[in-house]
Amino acid sequence: MLSIIEKFPTRIAIELTPICNLACNMCPRHIIDKNSGFLDFELWKRLLDEIKEFSPDTIVLPFWRGESLLHKEFVKFSKYALEKNIRLHISTNGHHVKDEKAKILSKYEFITFSLHTKEGFESALDFVKKYKTNTNTIQASFVECESEMMPFLDELIQSENFCGFDAIRLYEEHTKEGKFGYSGKEIFESRIFCPKLTNTLVISSDGYISRCNHIWKTENYNLNTKSIKEAWASEVMGDIKNNYPDSMCLSCDQWSGNTNGKIWKKEDNLLSEINIGNI
């Protein structure tokens, strides 16, 4: 098992805030009690400096349980990362993609608009029209249980060149019955070691680590006093990996790729619809 785990995480989610301006029915926010706080800039700097030194190709995802653009210093945080040539991937609901935040967001390597409202959809369309470049990839994503959003999904798929988006994603619902990562689907394959545990570290806005972006709970290990390398090699993370699947991971079936849904892309003017596999 140890042979498949990266020496340094290749994907690091750093939560800017757990606060969100929406309250989507399927969102795990309804079963957690953490809904306040903002990441400190000094912690952000230190984490990014370490990434730049030890693993400059690592992808940083400055979001987790909330809407990152609600952070008042989002532009400042982004500028620091971009000056370090950090690879930035982000998901946003689109409601706060305006003015300076929109301009700096356009410099991210990958932007996915997680669309849950008409306002978010219109904001995403406006962003693509103004800020699509050859250096960023922009995706529109939907969740199948939100039937009111399906007309917008159909509009994009049927439009010429996806209205400027590079891809369109349809996710299936997960975290059902109050169980993190649980889809409720019958699985016919043998469980594999979760890919997330091999390469991804999640850090909350107050510095605590989590085993996975699907498990919206943190561990008793804080990066305000530790490094990423120390956290990745810590006894806390080691126990999680050595005891996988423990009680927290057992009901989660994201290792199977069950909720990754479908993705639509166009290459050489040909539309392709792909079923997504393992995470």
Image (cartoon, rainbow, N blue to C red):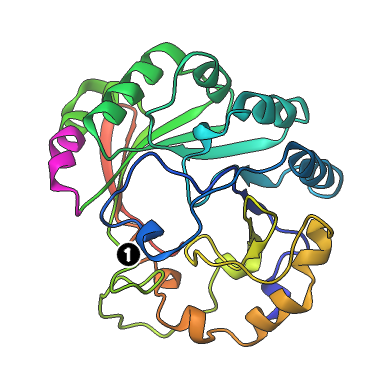
Residue 251 higher or lower than 108, as above or below: below
Q: Nearer the viewer, residue 131 or 4?
A: 131
Magenta stretch mostly in which secondary structure?
A: helix
SS state under label 1: loop
- The x, y position of residue 242, in whole percent, is 66, 85
Q: Image quadrant of residue 21?
A: top left
- Can you say which quadrant of the picture contains the N terminus? bottom right
Q: Nearer the viewer, residue 22 or 252?
A: 22
Q: Which residues are magenta?
A: 145-154
- The x, y position of residue 108, in whole percent, is 58, 29
Question: Residue at 65% of width from left, 29% of height from top?
Answer: 78
The question of residue 147 being in magenta is answered with: yes
Question: Residue at 39% of width from left, 57% of height from top?
Answer: 29
The question of residue 59 being in magenta is answered with: no
Q: Nearer the viewer, residue 75 or 9?
A: 75
Question: Residue at 48% of width from left, 52% of height from top?
Answer: 35
Q: Nearer the viewer, residue 129 or 64?
A: 64
- The x, y position of residue 71, in whole percent, is 56, 34
**Horizontal placement of 117 versus 194: left or right?**
left
Residue 22 higher or lower than 2, as above or below: above
Q: Which residue is mark 1?
A: 174
- The x, y position of residue 213, in whole percent, is 52, 60
Q: Amino acid at mark 1?
A: His
Residue 180 higher or lower than 35, as above or below: below
**Horizontal placement of 230 versus 14: left or right?**
right
Q: Residues within 10 Å of mark 1 (few under 14, many from 20)?
A: many
